[in-house]
Image (cartoon, grey):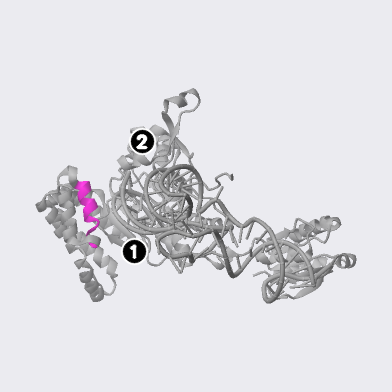
RNA sequence: UUGGCCGUAGCUUCAAAUGGUAGAGCGCUGCACUGUGAAUGCAGAACGUUGCGGGUUCGAAUCCCGUCGGCCGACCCA
């Protein structure tokens, strides 16, 4: 009976071709983040369990992978450690721990796996990589604008052109719900229902409200507000045409902000939130990324540590999001007692890779063979000579990827192997060639074969390489 | 945490009428071609504990239960 060799549920092995894609995306992300002045950080996979508990909300608590106490305490079934659930809470812990040693504005990026005991689905795994950028120590909307700009640039560099950054604000959300007269304990339910408006329509949402015990008057007000938002699209189109300078997205956002002011009215925190959003959009305009932003009062985000702006990046062909983030001004304070404000954004590596794979967005050369040339072996006696020649090639042609066939198989087999791997050139050193100080170089694509002096091969191959 | 669909050789949106003997293609290995791959021909292997475990039946790939894995949707998220 063969042992089970599949990885654990929701976990994956990455074979070379998949890993090449992942590494390509990670490289782009690092390059972009570095260009915005973010610095790298890594933290342990495991955190003390109390570091994580109570930071993510009820659902989050449930999905944390807990680690049982070891040794004789294992029997108690008690957990004292846990795998990190995201990179934001570990950052907050780091800032609380090293606060005065870090720059006043700590801008860091972090690309590491996180673990969630969720049910796997399309683009969702139990172990996955988050690519975070965060900035601590400032309340300025410049931070939001900057992380939005950086994330946008990552996606643009990778070749995405149809993503949308939906932007909302916790305080604005609270203001809207309060203005509609939704009871405090029903606000979460109300948001879940409202979120389905475009799928199930006004009546469907009204039914959901009823099922969740949300009054018809409050629910009705809320519906009126959200139902009228799409109308702004048309108005925005009109405005954009009239003004020329203003993109449709910018016009829409201005209209949406205006509508929010009308609805939220005198709610103080809500009004401040709206003003905050207005500034973020304005700064994003200055950064040249405002046309990707869409104010969307319906996004909520489940993580409980957000206090201000919240955002999500999405593309049409993925139900979930490619990334999300927001401002969390008292998370660091939960560790140190000292309030340090912060705001950040996280891109999901596997979702980016998923969409890019489906759309064929990866560069061609990622799929190329593992080597540029395969040196064959003639027989057991000549193995050392093949090794020596391979070493010679690697030395004289920097960057050339040289593979050596390990067994003294028949030449036909060795060529077949090279062919199966897609290696473009094969070197054959038979007794005749060796006697003359030559090797045969076969071009596997054309089938042509040339006999060259050993010392000429490196230059010839370097030239032939794409 | 919840509902639907699915699981057959290494691979395939595979086949096997309503329970009655498991088939094909590709691939693989060898030979024609013991100094040349991707072509062609011939031969061959493993022909598959029909995901796994149990049940119903004279008899199960097929029906039932459980379990594992995958896909889709709800909820949640990256």
- Tell me the mark number nearer the camera, choosing from 2 and 1: 2
Secondary structure state at the residue bearing disc 1: helix
Subunit that carries the residue with mark 2 = A
Q: Position of residue A292 (x, y in %)?
A: 34, 64
**Does residue A99 lie above or below A447 as drawn?**
above
A190 falls in the magenta region: yes
- Where the N terminus of chain A falls, by quadrant? top right
Q: Chain of mark 1?
A: A
Which residue is pictured at 67% across the width and 69% down the height? A465
Residue that numbered label 1 is attached to: A292
Percent coordinates x, y for residue A89 in the rendering: 39, 41
Can you see residue A157?
A: no
Position of residue A74 measured from the top left corner of the image (x, y, whole percent): 46, 27
Magenta stretch: helix, strand or loop mostly:
helix
The residue segment tinted magenta is A187-198
Q: Nearer the viewer, residue A16 or A11?
A: A11
* Quadrant in the rendering for residue A221: bottom left
- Alpha carbons under labels 2 and 1: distance apart: 35 Å
Asked whether A329 or A129 is in front, the reply is A129
Q: Position of A79 compared to B4: left or right?
A: right
Whether residue A55 sits left or right of residue A129 in the image: it is left
Front one among A94 and A111: A111
In the orientation shown, which residue stands out farthest toward the top?
Answer: A72
Pick whichever of labels 2 and 1 is earlier in the sequence. 2
Q: Which residue is mark 2?
A: A53
The x, y position of residue A62, in whole percent, is: 35, 39
């Amino acid at each position: 009976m063969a042992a089970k060799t599949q990885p654990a549920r929701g976990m994956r092995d990455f074979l070379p071709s998949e890993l090449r894609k992942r590494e390509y995306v990670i490289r782009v992300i690092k390059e972009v983040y570095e260009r915005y002045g973010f610095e790298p950080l890594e933290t342990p996979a495991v955190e003390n369990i109390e570091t994580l508990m109570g930071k993510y909300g009820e659902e989050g608590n449930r999905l944390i992978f807990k680690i049982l106490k070891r040794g004789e305490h294992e029997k108690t079934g008690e957990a004292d450690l846990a795998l990190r659930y995201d990179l934001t809470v570990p950052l907050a812990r780091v800032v609380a721990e090293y606060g005065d040693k870090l720059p006043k504005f700590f801008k860091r990026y972090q690309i590491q796996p996180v673990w969630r005991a969720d049910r796997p689905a399309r683009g969702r795994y139990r172990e996955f990589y988050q690519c975070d950028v965060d900035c601590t120590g400032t309340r300025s909307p410049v931070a939001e604008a900057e992380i939005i700009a950086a994330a946008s640039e990552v996606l643009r560099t990778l070749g995405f052109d149809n993503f949308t950054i939906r932007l909302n604000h916790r305080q604005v959300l609270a203001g809207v719900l309060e203005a509609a007269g939704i009871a405090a304990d029903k606000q979460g339910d109300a948001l879940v229902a409202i979120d389905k408006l475009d799928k199930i329509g006004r009546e469907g949402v009204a039914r959901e409200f009823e099922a969740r015990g949300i009054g018809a008057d409050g629910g009705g007000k809320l519906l009126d507000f959200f139902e009228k938002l799409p109308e702004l699209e048309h108005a925005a189109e009109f405005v954009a045409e009239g003004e020329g300078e203003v993109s449709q997205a910018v016009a829409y956002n201005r209209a949406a902000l205006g509508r929010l002011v009308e609805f939220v009215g005198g709610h103080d925190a809500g009004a401040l939130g709206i003003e905050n959003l207005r500034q973020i959009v304005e700064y994003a305009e200055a950064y040249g990324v405002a046309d990707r932003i869409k104010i969307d009062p319906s996004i909520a985000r489940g993580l409980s540590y957000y206090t201000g702006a919240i955002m999500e990046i999405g593309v049409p062909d993925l139900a979930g999001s490619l990334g999300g983030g927001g401002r969390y001004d008292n998370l660091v304070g939960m560790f140190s007692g000292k309030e340090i404000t912060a705001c950040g954004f996280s891109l999901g590596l596997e979702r980016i890779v998923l969409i890019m794979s489906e759309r064929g967005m990866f560069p061609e050369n990622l799929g190329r063979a593992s080597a540029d040339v395969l040196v064959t072996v003639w027989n057991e006696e000549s193995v050392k000579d093949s090794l020596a020649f391979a070493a010679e090639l690697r030395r004289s042609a920097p960057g050339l990827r040289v593979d050596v066939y390990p067994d003294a198989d028949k030449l036909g087999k060795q060529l077949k192997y090279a062919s199966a791997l897609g290696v473009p050139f094969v070197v054959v050193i038979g007794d005749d060639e060796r006697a003359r100080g030559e090797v045969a170089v076969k071009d596997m694509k054309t089938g042509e074969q040339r006999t060259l002096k050993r010392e000429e091969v490196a230059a010839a191959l370097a030239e032939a390489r794409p």
